[in-house]
Amino acid sequence: MAHRIVYRKYGEPSVLGLEEFEPKEVGPTDVAIDVAFSGINFGDCIARRGFYSSAPPPPGCVGFEVSGTVQRVGTRVRGLKRGDRVLAVTRFGGYASVLVVDAAYVTKLPRGMSLEHAAALPAVYLTAWHSLYEIARARKGESVLIHAVAGGVGLAALQLAKDLGLVTYGTASSDVKLDLAREHGLDHGINYATRAWKAEVLAETRGRGVDIVLDSLGGEGFKKGYQSLARGGRIITIGAATCKDSSTRAKRLCSEVCINRSHSFRTTAQSRAFKFSTGGTTRLTLPEGWGRSCASTKRESRDPSSTARIRFATQPPRMRSSSRAGRRASSCCTRRRYCVCLNRTLSHTSFAL
């Protein structure tokens, strides 16, 4: 029998407990992993507290990323064998001693990477990579504002931003956290507990604003982030950390993004897999077709390959035809600010505001 950590009711960490369970059968394309480490993310915490609408209900087991050794492989799996050191991503269920997952979500570890480090890699670095490279299309010389810059996604985004040659601005709640971020290359740090970060950003940029905002705050922070954008800038939201109300509306806002006005939007299909390219330093290589997009005129995306969901706080203007919406979304980036919403499965929706 295997073991897993579950929450039997919503609440603080004290609701977590250990139970025995029978892992599912290994299918032809599956891999069974003897888990050594499980990554812990903010999404796990809000799921445990009942704010993650797609998380399993109590008794539920969360966890998006694990590392360990291959225990067994399915008959159609190639390139993996028993004993291989691997990391894997999963849609919940990672807090377990044994994980059975499709081989498409499993990759061998490069030499020199520990199992401990590997378990903390996928969620934060895939989110940061997808945000900066695939959605924002960041280019050398641009500027980026990263909220919670000393957190997991924050540090990952900071490292990638420096690799891209971006000018980096970051916010954190203490000088100690900012010092940590500076060790990773942060150019301009702002302690939001003692200073008004929007005013600081505009002052540092001489009123221009930044090209990209990576927003994990939501609420009022999202509004200020949008106001901090330069002309043609992009704001990408990856969370709603300031959503503290326990009401039904607050829970919904943790998993759905509310935009007050919009003219058009498009969605992209979520990634199915990722792989490593090894050579010198370790980098994540995303699969072909990652950036495919489609135009839509409906208020809520019905594309089965995407899980993006949209709800408007107020009635939006009448949507245009698909072709015109697509042209508008792609052509007005030089004169409008953009709001891009990255949801928990790495799908995204972008709005021309």
Image: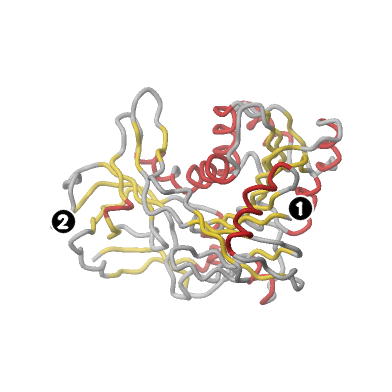
Quarter of the image holding residue 98? Answer: bottom left
213 sits left or right of 302 in the view: right
For the residue marked with disc 1, what is the amino acid? Gly
Look at mark 1 in the image and give the residue it sits on: 221
Q: Residues within 10 Å of mark 1 (few under 14, many from 20)?
A: some
Residue 135, horizontal then vertical, whole percent: 57, 46
User: Looking at the image, is 117 positioned above or below residue 3?
Assistant: above
Q: Residue at x 44, y 68 (%)?
A: 304
Tag 1–tag 2 contact (CB < 8 Å):
no
Considering every residue shown, the one lying at the far left of the view is: 75
What element does badge 1 sit on? Answer: helix
Residue 85, horizontal then vertical, whole percent: 26, 41
48 sits left or right of 98 in the view: right
Residue 121, horizontal then vertical, whole percent: 44, 42
Residue closest to the eye, 37 or 248:
248
Residue 330, horizontal then vertical, whole percent: 62, 49
For the residue marked with disc 2, what is the amino acid? Arg
Residue closest to the eye, 170 or 298:
298
What element does badge 2 sit on? Answer: loop
Q: Residues within 10 Å of mark 2 (few under 14, many from 20)?
A: few
Residue closest to the eye, 163 or 245:
163
Look at mark 2 in the image and give the residue it sits on: 76
- CA gap, disc 1 and disc 2: 48 Å
User: Looking at the image, is 225 positioned above or below residue 95?
Assistant: above
**Quadrant in which the C terminus appears:** bottom right
